Amino acid sequence: MITLYKSDETNFEHNGLGRIDNEARLAEAEEEINGLYSYVIKYPIKGRYGSVIKNQMLIKAPTPYGNQIFRIYRLEPSMGMLTITCLHIFYDLAFNFIEDTNIINKSGQAFLQQLGNSTQYKHPFQFFSDIATVSGSRIVRKNCVEILLNGNLDNSFVSRYGGEILRDNFTIYFNKAIGRDRNFKITYRKNLKGYKAKIDDKSVITRIMPIGFNGLLLPEKYIDSPRIKDYPFPRIGKLELDVKAAVGEYADDEDAVPIEEAYEKMRQLTKEQFGIIDVPTTSYDVDFIELSKTKEYENFKLLETVLMGDTVTVDHSEDNFHVSSKIIKYKFDGLKKRFTALELGQFESRASNSNINQKRSFEQKIRNVVQEAHNLIQVAANKKNTIYRGADRPNNANVGDLWYQPDGQNVIAKQWSGTDWEIIPFGGENFGNININDLSGNAIDIKQFRLANNNEDILFINQDGEVVLNVKHIHLDTKDVATLDDLKNIEGKQGPQGISVTSVVKYYLLSDMDTGITHASSGWQTEPVTMTETKRYLWTYDKTIYSNGMTTQTVPVVTGAHGQTGIGSPGKPGTGISSTNISYASSTSGTTAPLSGWQPNPPTVPNGQYLWTKTVWNYTNQSSQTAYSVSKMGEVGPPGSIDEKQLRDITNKIESKLDATDANTRLDELSKKTEEIRVDLEARAIAKEVAIWKREYDNQVADTERVINSFSKDFIDSTNRITAIEAELRSNALLLNFVNTYLRASDEGVILGNIDNSEYIELTPGGMLIKSAGEKVMTFANGQVKVLHGVFVETLQISHYRFEPSRNDERILLVRFIDKI
């Protein structure tokens, strides 16, 4: 069900403005791992809600993760159809802002908590992560979505921590990996419709040269991949590592390690790259049938379910194609509630310090800036252009002239383009007005650095790494900086005793609330506990005890929620009815079923004998069950007597009923009612039992037509019979009065009921029927009760299936399965 809500709705447990899936022509969810999550709906412009749907409204729609909330961002009306494009409610965070926050040495969970608490205005989202990696990031004037997912930002979550996102309405998970191997298989001639594979090995590296700090190389220089022989020649690349050896001038550095340990660390970090950079880039577009949505597999839904990030096996034996890969993108039909396409491929979520195959590293950006600045200086020094300095706008400039414009304590570099002074871009970044809050990178590769004043060097770093500082005094924050000789003459005081952590205690609390839990809440304990269906939320916090007796406590957080029922071992296959056979036979016995003579259609049964009906149910487990029903054909009674006047009255009534026009009219009405019943039964055929019911009804219609034909043929004989018994009926005036009031003959049999024909029961050779207002409403024949006309005010139940009107729209008929009858 797809439900439409107002743009500011917060409660999605009701039916909102109404359902739109009843008239929708298409409803498709599309999600890419760590990418876009969208929903597209095609809805008739003249539909019930065609004029109601507006941008920014919300919808609740089916996805592989159940119902999810989406916001409408684009409406495209065309040729009677409205195309509605929605984005997951997660993208509301794209319009919230982080002004400035500095995240220092925190895990993935702590990063997300600080991010969520630093937005410009409050939001309903909760963040969770199982990433234990410690990192940090300075975030200035960015929105939440780009900080989480933009891999081109060096300070984004995916750049610093890696991970894969799972968006579940207002709960956002960013874990090391989502999905698992559910043993889901797509196999040729079972559920595989088609596939398209892309295998690209142009970026494969099979021999790596690791380079440590300050150009440190391994004695063997290279490390080979186990897959190096898969290619005709080695494919070599370098890997820069932040590993410093304690040698030379770095021997006493705190972050330096012994040379052999540095070598071993470089080897280990390099080998971790294999399995990633030495295999081709692959992707697979798979078109398949989701068997969990088909009739044959409806009892095995849990075994045929797959989600984003899961590992899927595709097997096409005739193409010799067999691959297991991760789902990185899918399309899901929200109307049929099944996948329509999967894209499988590689997704490396781990944040890496490798610069192999990086499109543009930080070092390369710096080199580009230096090179472009060098080129600019050459142009400015070519004696064809002029360099201007000062606040006044230069006049009569030539193309290529430079202007260094003061701006407070900064200087903006501009160049005359021929029409205006334009800020000079460096390396794709605007360095005209530099204001750096945070500059980070493995290294800034500049051959030499010189800071001068009036051609006198103040600070100079040459190619050999020697630093020359020509100053008399150095002041930092107005304080004089002591030299090494000064420090030798200063004796420091012993500092205070340090404070260490003596223990960290984790506290647990089970609750049925996902908010409002504090340290003061009752029930905290130090032993781990297990979530239950009633207490679905596990709260935790850490208490740190220090050596000086002080303690600190973290804020209680929800670290998990009771998930859905897991997948267990499949139960035994259920037993259903595969077919039903009905046959008929006549017999002189009403207690013992016939041993032979059974036939598919009811036979003609002599008066006083019995009609037997045998029903055989064949089950899917190859067993069967047989049931019998029996009815007796009544005997012909003795003729009644009537006086001459009453006989004429009865004859006139019978003749009036036999009017040809009236008979044709009744026959037409019967045919019309028969067609209406047939259409109604076909529309309600929702199960095999109802289909059998309709088949039996068709047989009954045929039998009824045969009875009518037979009755028409026999009517003349009946009229003669009435004339023959005229004399005997004369003496039964009192009996005739009773018969005339409550018992009378009809075209088809005998009637019991009121004289005005409003409500009565009619006994016919084929069985018994009940009429109301002259119309058939119920029949009893061949061991079955059939309702032809009726109004069920509350509900109608057939076996385990109950029909009832929708509470939202009485025009909609719902079918519910009832476990107990």
Image (cartoon, grey):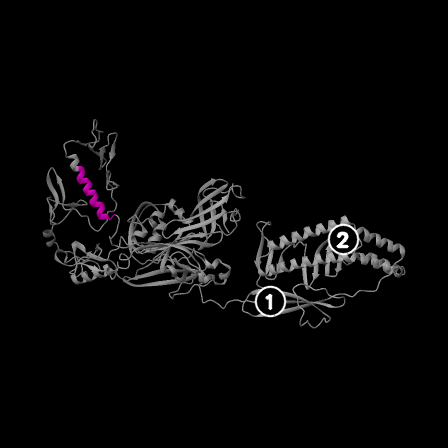
* Other residues around mark 1 within 10 Å, as few (<14) / some (14–19) / many (≥20): some
**Marks 2 & 1, CB-CB < 8 Å contact:** no
Question: Mark 2 and mark 1: span between their CA atoms?
Answer: 40 Å
Indicate the position of residue 365 as horizontal and vertical percent values. Answer: 23, 45
Indicate the position of residue 655 as horizontal and vertical percent values. Answer: 82, 52
Q: Residue furthest top?
A: 396
- Asked whether residue 498 appears in the rendered view, the answer is no
| Quarter the C terminus occupies | bottom right
Magenta-colored span: 360-376
339 vs 177, nearest the viewer: 339
Q: Quadrant of residue 374?
A: top left
Q: Secondary structure at mark 1?
A: strand
Does residue 605 lie above or below 681 as drawn? Answer: below
Q: Secondary structure at mark 2?
A: loop
Q: Which mark is residue 97?
A: none
- Is residue 368 shown in magenta? yes
The residue under label 2 is which amino acid type? Answer: Ser
393 vs 254, nearest the viewer: 393
Indicate the position of residue 245 as horizontal and vertical percent values. Answer: 16, 58
**Position of 169 compared to 653: left or right?**
left
320 vs 513, nearest the viewer: 320
Of marks 2 and 1, which one's residue comes earlier in the chain? 1
Q: What residue would you read off at disc 2?
A: 758
